[in-house]
Amino acid sequence: MQDITDLSALALSAAIAERRLDCRTVMAAYLSRIEAVNPRINAIVSLRPAEALLAEAEEAERALAAGDYRGWLHGMPFAVKDLSEARGILCSFGSANYADFVPDYDDIHVERIRAAGAIIIGKTNAPEMGLGSHSYNPVFGVTRNPYDTTKSAGGSSGGAAAGLAVRILPVADGSDMMGSLRNPAAFNNVVGFRPSFGRIPSLGSELFLGQLAVNGPMGRSVADVAALLATQAGHDPRDPLSLRDEDLSLDSGRDLSGARIGWLGDFGGYLPFEPGVLELCRASLDVFRRLGCTVEDVPPGFDMARLWQVWRTLRHFLVSGGQAADYADPERRARMKPEMIWEIEHGHDLTGAEIYAASLGRSDWHRHVAGLFETYDFLILPAAQVFPFDAELDWPKAIDGRTMDTYHRWMEVVIGPTLAGLPVAAMPAGFGANGLPAGIQIIGRARGDRDVLAAAAAYERATDWLARYPEF
């Protein structure tokens, strides 16, 4: 049974489709693995009863025998991030205010995952309302890093990333506003992909102003991630900003020789890094050189302090609007984490002129980055500024002697691609002397998702980092 959970998602899919493995055996193998491993890391929450899941697996096997093949996820176990709705399963958002919320609908990308044949087994853990890149909350507690269970698995897709690392999930969904697909990928030595804004449609009460967060795939390989992206992506009229359908199939043999790589690093000393992280990420540039790429350091060329202020303003604005009803209720407000209240109250203080000025700043940043892509094919950044930190901390208060003045300042390295709406693959960069993983961001041109995945696949072929996983 252990061998089944070691299979990549695509290999597992092929084994089911070709009737080399039956769906019930697959489900039983994963449930056995979850029972053995999950209590130590707390990646999967709201796990459905085994009897119901095995019955669904048997039904999937009967459908397959009758010629009803539903898609590449047919009969495969899947846990949805606990920030997305999955019909009939608790969706707590990591908040005590939603500890009994069971939706009667799926978010759009969950609909598509289910339609492709997946069996939804439960949810993956996340921080309260997705705030903070550390997956702990008052409903389910903390998710721990499988490379060292005293450390954080990151977030907000920390449960998904940790679950992939220990082989209790074949593939996973996540979401990303401030690095929530990228930081946990780096912390757990897996692949995370932040698609272009609009690539994956989503339901929401506010459809036009919230242009920072996206849903996206995570996996143990680039090929698995590309397959899930193709399932999640595509226009839906319920999301007016969703992009048209495109070919997102993986160009797995792309030759990168001659590609031009720009290394952004620490933006000329602007960003602090825990000793060892920046050096490890910089060393990964040798992989691109061996692939025939030219690699150059890129000077900042933009006021990064201004970019941080742009980020703070827009994030305050969106969080305060989205959580306004809960904040207005004193009982619900009392159950909110301090960081949430901080975001909301700063949002209340904003003027329309300040929000407009932030949008202008974001526009200037977009133009600056677009100019960089006239010279470079891809830009590279570290995916996090620290190695996985103590799981009992709420967030790192300092990096290399520099105090972090907000709960999310330690993740500032991820805001650039978000604000430009660009596709990003988070890929492993190896392991530090402490045995903990780090990762890089491979950033592509606007809507160049397929190109970024092709570059990530070439990088994956030239390394063996994804073949290393924690012993559990």
Image (cartoon, rainbow, N blue to C red):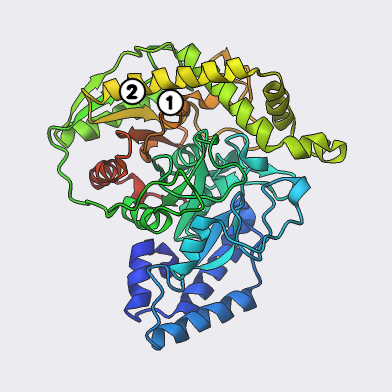
Q: Residues within 10 Å of mark 1 (few under 14, many from 20)?
A: many
Circle number at residue 416: 1
Relative to 224, say whether 16 is above or below. Answer: below
Q: Residue at x 49, y 31 (%)?
A: 387
What x and y, as percent, mark residue 35? 61, 65
Q: Residue at x 39, y 16 (%)?
A: 267
Kindly indicate whether the residue at mark 2 contacts the one at mark 1 (C-beta within 8 angstroms). yes
Instruction: In this rendered view, identify the residue nearer to me: 301 or 122.
Output: 301
Is residue 69 shown left or right of residue 49?
left
Relative to 418, say whether 116 is above or below. Answer: below
Image quadrant of residue 332? top right
Disc 2 marks which residue? 369
What x and y, as percent, mark residue 416? 43, 25
Relative to 339, say whether 140 is above or below. Answer: below
- N-term-proximal mark, 1 vs 2: 2
What x and y, as percent, mark residue 60? 48, 80
